[in-house]
Amino acid sequence: MRIRIVDAFTDRPFSGNPAGVLLLDSFPDDHWLQKVATEVNLSETAFAHPLPPGGEADWALRWFTPATEVDMCGHATLATAHVLHTTGAATGTVRFAARCGVLAATTAPDGTITMDFPTSSLTPVAAPDGLEKALGAEIVSVHDTAAHIGDLLVELRDEAAVRSLTPDLTALAGLSERGVIATAAAEQPDRGYDFVSRGFFPRVGIDEDPVTGSAHTALAPFWTARLGRDDLTGLQGGARTGIVRTRLRGDRTLLTGHAVTVIDGELNA
Protein backbone atom coordinates (compact mmCIF):
# COMPACT_ATOMS: atom_id res chain seq x y z
CA MET A 1 0.00 0.00 0.00
CA ARG A 2 1.08 3.59 -0.55
CA ILE A 3 2.48 5.66 2.29
CA ARG A 4 3.22 9.35 2.01
CA ILE A 5 5.10 11.75 4.23
CA VAL A 6 3.65 15.24 4.03
CA ASP A 7 5.05 18.42 5.56
CA ALA A 8 2.08 20.39 6.89
CA PHE A 9 1.65 24.10 7.64
CA THR A 10 4.39 24.99 5.18
CA ASP A 11 4.81 25.46 1.44
CA ARG A 12 8.43 24.23 1.46
CA PRO A 13 9.84 20.73 1.97
CA PHE A 14 11.70 20.00 5.19
CA SER A 15 9.83 22.56 7.26
CA GLY A 16 6.46 22.63 9.00
CA ASN A 17 5.35 19.40 10.67
CA PRO A 18 5.71 16.03 8.89
CA ALA A 19 2.94 13.44 9.08
CA GLY A 20 2.54 9.98 7.65
CA VAL A 21 -0.61 9.39 5.57
CA LEU A 22 -2.09 6.03 4.55
CA LEU A 23 -5.32 5.75 2.56
CA LEU A 24 -6.92 2.35 3.22
CA ASP A 25 -10.02 0.41 2.22
CA SER A 26 -10.88 -0.13 5.90
CA PHE A 27 -9.09 0.04 9.24
CA PRO A 28 -7.06 -3.06 10.16
CA ASP A 29 -6.74 -3.94 13.83
CA ASP A 30 -5.45 -1.29 16.22
CA HIS A 31 -2.25 -3.19 16.93
CA TRP A 32 -1.21 -2.98 13.26
CA LEU A 33 -2.05 0.72 13.07
CA GLN A 34 0.07 1.41 16.14
CA LYS A 35 2.99 -0.64 14.81
CA VAL A 36 2.98 1.33 11.56
CA ALA A 37 2.90 4.65 13.44
CA THR A 38 5.76 3.50 15.64
CA GLU A 39 7.74 2.49 12.57
CA VAL A 40 7.07 5.81 10.81
CA ASN A 41 8.11 7.53 14.07
CA LEU A 42 6.64 10.96 13.32
CA SER A 43 4.52 12.93 15.75
CA GLU A 44 1.43 11.55 14.00
CA THR A 45 0.55 9.09 11.29
CA ALA A 46 -2.95 9.42 9.81
CA PHE A 47 -5.03 6.50 8.57
CA ALA A 48 -8.15 7.16 6.48
CA HIS A 49 -10.68 5.14 4.52
CA PRO A 50 -13.73 6.20 2.46
CA LEU A 51 -17.22 5.97 3.95
CA PRO A 52 -20.44 5.09 2.10
CA PRO A 53 -22.04 8.09 0.35
CA GLY A 54 -24.91 9.95 1.95
CA GLY A 55 -23.60 10.05 5.50
CA GLU A 56 -22.41 12.94 7.65
CA ALA A 57 -18.78 12.33 6.65
CA ASP A 58 -16.86 11.22 3.55
CA TRP A 59 -13.81 9.58 5.15
CA ALA A 60 -13.04 7.95 8.48
CA LEU A 61 -9.84 9.31 10.02
CA ARG A 62 -7.62 8.21 12.91
CA TRP A 63 -4.28 9.49 14.18
CA PHE A 64 -1.50 7.67 16.04
CA THR A 65 1.68 8.98 17.63
CA PRO A 66 4.61 6.54 17.99
CA ALA A 67 3.13 5.63 21.38
CA THR A 68 -0.68 5.99 21.31
CA GLU A 69 -3.85 7.02 19.46
CA VAL A 70 -4.95 10.63 19.93
CA ASP A 71 -8.39 12.27 19.82
CA MET A 72 -7.52 15.23 17.60
CA CYS A 73 -4.67 16.21 15.29
CA GLY A 74 -4.54 19.24 13.03
CA HIS A 75 -1.39 18.82 10.98
CA ALA A 76 -2.09 15.18 10.06
CA THR A 77 -5.63 16.14 9.03
CA LEU A 78 -4.17 18.86 6.81
CA ALA A 79 -1.72 16.31 5.39
CA THR A 80 -4.53 13.83 4.67
CA ALA A 81 -6.65 16.47 2.92
CA HIS A 82 -3.60 17.43 0.86
CA VAL A 83 -3.07 13.81 -0.24
CA LEU A 84 -6.75 13.37 -1.12
CA HIS A 85 -6.70 16.56 -3.19
CA THR A 86 -3.38 16.01 -4.98
CA THR A 87 -4.19 12.39 -5.88
CA GLY A 88 -7.70 13.19 -7.10
CA ALA A 89 -9.31 11.00 -4.44
CA ALA A 90 -11.42 13.96 -3.32
CA THR A 91 -12.19 17.51 -4.39
CA GLY A 92 -13.59 20.60 -2.70
CA THR A 93 -14.61 20.06 0.92
CA VAL A 94 -13.88 16.73 2.59
CA ARG A 95 -15.63 15.73 5.82
CA PHE A 96 -13.77 13.43 8.22
CA ALA A 97 -15.37 11.30 10.93
CA ALA A 98 -12.95 11.23 13.87
CA ARG A 99 -12.94 10.55 17.60
CA CYS A 100 -13.48 14.29 18.26
CA GLY A 101 -16.45 14.56 15.87
CA VAL A 102 -16.82 15.55 12.23
CA LEU A 103 -14.04 17.77 10.86
CA ALA A 104 -14.12 19.48 7.46
CA ALA A 105 -11.21 20.49 5.21
CA THR A 106 -11.63 22.70 2.14
CA THR A 107 -8.92 23.08 -0.49
CA ALA A 108 -8.71 26.43 -2.28
CA PRO A 109 -7.53 26.89 -5.90
CA ASP A 110 -4.13 28.09 -4.64
CA GLY A 111 -3.64 24.85 -2.71
CA THR A 112 -4.22 26.26 0.77
CA ILE A 113 -6.38 24.08 2.98
CA THR A 114 -8.80 25.42 5.59
CA MET A 115 -9.94 23.06 8.33
CA ASP A 116 -13.03 23.52 10.49
CA PHE A 117 -12.31 22.35 14.07
CA PRO A 118 -14.16 22.77 17.38
CA THR A 119 -12.91 25.72 19.43
CA SER A 120 -11.28 24.67 22.68
CA SER A 121 -12.53 25.91 26.01
CA LEU A 122 -10.01 27.74 28.19
CA THR A 123 -10.11 27.48 31.98
CA PRO A 124 -7.69 29.62 34.04
CA VAL A 125 -5.84 27.40 36.51
CA ALA A 126 -3.01 27.76 38.97
CA ALA A 127 0.34 26.60 37.65
CA PRO A 128 0.90 23.02 38.78
CA ASP A 129 3.75 22.51 41.21
CA GLY A 130 6.98 22.12 39.27
CA LEU A 131 5.72 23.57 35.96
CA GLU A 132 7.78 26.75 36.06
CA LYS A 133 10.90 24.80 37.04
CA ALA A 134 10.28 22.18 34.32
CA LEU A 135 9.91 24.89 31.66
CA GLY A 136 12.77 26.98 32.99
CA ALA A 137 10.87 30.22 32.35
CA GLU A 138 8.73 32.72 34.23
CA ILE A 139 5.00 31.98 33.79
CA VAL A 140 2.46 34.75 33.23
CA SER A 141 -0.72 32.63 33.12
CA VAL A 142 -1.89 29.02 32.73
CA HIS A 143 -5.11 27.74 31.13
CA ASP A 144 -6.47 24.21 30.87
CA THR A 145 -7.90 23.22 27.48
CA ALA A 146 -10.80 21.05 26.34
CA ALA A 147 -10.95 17.30 26.83
CA HIS A 148 -10.06 16.34 23.24
CA ILE A 149 -6.85 18.40 23.53
CA GLY A 150 -5.78 17.99 27.14
CA ASP A 151 -2.95 20.54 27.08
CA LEU A 152 -1.87 23.23 29.47
CA LEU A 153 -1.64 26.55 27.63
CA VAL A 154 1.14 28.50 29.31
CA GLU A 155 1.69 32.19 28.60
CA LEU A 156 5.27 33.42 28.92
CA ARG A 157 6.47 37.00 29.18
CA ASP A 158 7.75 37.43 25.60
CA GLU A 159 8.70 35.76 22.32
CA ALA A 160 12.34 35.40 23.34
CA ALA A 161 11.34 33.34 26.38
CA VAL A 162 9.35 30.94 24.17
CA ARG A 163 12.12 30.59 21.62
CA SER A 164 14.82 29.89 24.22
CA LEU A 165 12.97 27.12 26.10
CA THR A 166 14.93 23.96 26.92
CA PRO A 167 12.42 22.21 29.20
CA ASP A 168 12.85 19.19 31.43
CA LEU A 169 10.72 16.82 29.35
CA THR A 170 10.60 14.09 31.97
CA ALA A 171 9.14 16.53 34.47
CA LEU A 172 6.67 17.94 31.94
CA ALA A 173 5.28 14.48 31.13
CA GLY A 174 3.52 14.27 34.49
CA LEU A 175 1.95 17.73 34.51
CA SER A 176 -0.86 17.51 31.91
CA GLU A 177 -3.10 15.03 30.13
CA ARG A 178 -1.40 15.46 26.73
CA GLY A 179 1.20 18.24 26.68
CA VAL A 180 2.24 21.81 27.33
CA ILE A 181 1.88 24.68 24.85
CA ALA A 182 4.05 27.71 25.64
CA THR A 183 3.05 30.96 23.95
CA ALA A 184 3.71 34.70 23.83
CA ALA A 185 2.79 37.66 21.68
CA ALA A 186 5.01 38.37 18.67
CA GLU A 187 7.67 40.96 19.37
CA GLN A 188 7.39 42.33 15.82
CA PRO A 189 3.91 41.62 14.37
CA ASP A 190 4.95 43.23 11.07
CA ARG A 191 7.07 40.13 10.41
CA GLY A 192 3.91 38.24 9.44
CA TYR A 193 2.69 36.56 12.64
CA ASP A 194 0.80 37.70 15.73
CA PHE A 195 1.90 35.15 18.33
CA VAL A 196 4.44 32.37 18.78
CA SER A 197 4.17 28.99 20.44
CA ARG A 198 6.01 25.75 21.07
CA GLY A 199 4.47 22.41 22.00
CA PHE A 200 5.95 19.65 24.17
CA PHE A 201 4.19 16.27 24.42
CA PRO A 202 6.51 13.71 26.07
CA ARG A 203 3.50 12.00 27.69
CA VAL A 204 2.39 10.72 24.25
CA GLY A 205 5.86 10.03 22.87
CA ILE A 206 6.59 13.43 21.26
CA ASP A 207 9.31 15.56 22.83
CA GLU A 208 8.50 18.65 20.75
CA ASP A 209 5.89 18.93 18.01
CA PRO A 210 6.94 21.48 15.38
CA VAL A 211 3.42 22.71 14.48
CA THR A 212 0.36 21.55 16.41
CA GLY A 213 -2.87 22.36 14.60
CA SER A 214 -5.13 21.17 17.43
CA ALA A 215 -3.37 23.48 19.91
CA HIS A 216 -4.37 26.44 17.74
CA THR A 217 -8.03 25.76 18.57
CA ALA A 218 -7.00 27.01 22.04
CA LEU A 219 -4.41 29.56 20.91
CA ALA A 220 -6.96 31.25 18.62
CA PRO A 221 -9.48 32.19 21.35
CA PHE A 222 -6.66 32.97 23.79
CA TRP A 223 -5.03 35.54 21.49
CA THR A 224 -8.27 36.83 19.99
CA ALA A 225 -9.31 37.88 23.50
CA ARG A 226 -6.01 39.73 23.99
CA LEU A 227 -5.45 41.20 20.53
CA GLY A 228 -9.07 41.99 19.66
CA ARG A 229 -9.05 40.36 16.21
CA ASP A 230 -10.71 37.15 15.03
CA ASP A 231 -8.19 36.54 12.19
CA LEU A 232 -4.67 35.86 13.44
CA THR A 233 -1.47 34.14 12.34
CA GLY A 234 0.63 31.94 14.59
CA LEU A 235 4.23 30.83 14.23
CA GLN A 236 5.05 27.59 16.02
CA GLY A 237 8.25 25.66 16.46
CA GLY A 238 11.81 25.62 17.64
CA ALA A 239 14.42 24.42 15.15
CA ARG A 240 11.64 23.60 12.66
CA THR A 241 8.72 26.02 12.27
CA GLY A 242 5.42 26.45 10.47
CA ILE A 243 2.64 29.00 10.03
CA VAL A 244 -1.01 28.54 11.03
CA ARG A 245 -3.63 31.12 10.07
CA THR A 246 -6.55 31.07 12.51
CA ARG A 247 -10.05 32.49 12.27
CA LEU A 248 -12.27 32.32 15.35
CA ARG A 249 -15.95 31.66 14.59
CA GLY A 250 -17.54 31.15 17.99
CA ASP A 251 -17.55 27.45 18.83
CA ARG A 252 -15.58 26.64 15.65
CA THR A 253 -12.04 27.63 14.71
CA LEU A 254 -10.79 27.68 11.12
CA LEU A 255 -7.16 26.66 10.64
CA THR A 256 -5.51 27.41 7.30
CA GLY A 257 -2.16 26.29 5.92
CA HIS A 258 -0.22 24.78 3.07
CA ALA A 259 1.20 21.27 2.74
CA VAL A 260 3.73 19.55 0.51
CA THR A 261 4.40 15.85 -0.10
CA VAL A 262 8.07 14.99 0.42
CA ILE A 263 8.00 11.17 0.26
CA ASP A 264 5.71 8.89 -1.73
CA GLY A 265 6.51 5.22 -1.28
CA GLU A 266 5.25 1.71 -0.62
CA LEU A 267 4.64 0.03 2.71
CA ASN A 268 5.59 -3.65 2.64
CA ALA A 269 3.87 -4.92 5.77
Image (cartoon, rainbow, N blue to C red):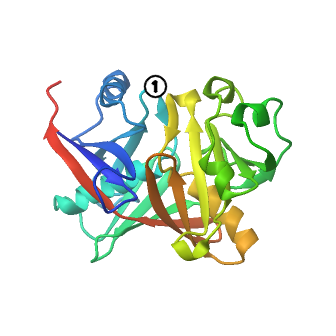
- The residue that appears at 24% across and 57% down in the rendered structure is 84
Q: Residue at x 36, y 21 (%)?
A: 31
Q: Does residue 48 sit above or below 66 in this rendering?
A: below
Horizontal relation, residue 204 to residue 21: left or right: right
Quadrant position of residue 41: top left
Q: Is residue 95 visible?
A: yes
Read off the residue under disc 1: 67
Return the x and y of residue 268 as percentages of the image width and height.
Answer: 14, 27
Task: Name, please, the residue furthest toward the right.
Answer: 126
Whether residue 1 is visible, yes or no, is no
Quadrant containing the N terminus is top left
Q: Identify the residue at image location x=42%, y=51%.
A: 75
Q: How many marks can you see?
A: 1
Image quadrant assignment for residue 82: bottom left
Dot 1, how many residues are within 10 Å of its Cα: few (below 14), some (14-19), or many (20+)?
some
Q: Secondary structure at mark 1?
A: loop
Is 40 situated above or below 18? above
Q: Where's residue 107, x and y in %?
A: 32, 70
Residue 88 quadrant:
bottom left
Q: Is residue 119 above or below residue 229?
A: above
Q: Residue at x 63, y 65 (%)?
A: 186
Residue 199, percent across and down?
57, 44
Task: Residue 197: give x, y in percent of width and height.
Answer: 60, 53
In the visual, does 209 lie left or right of 41?
right
Q: Which residue type does callout 1 highlight? A: Ala
Of 11 and 224, the residue lying toward us: 11
Q: Nearer the viewer, residue 170 or 250?
A: 170
- Seen from the viewer's position, the closer of residues 71 and 202 is 202
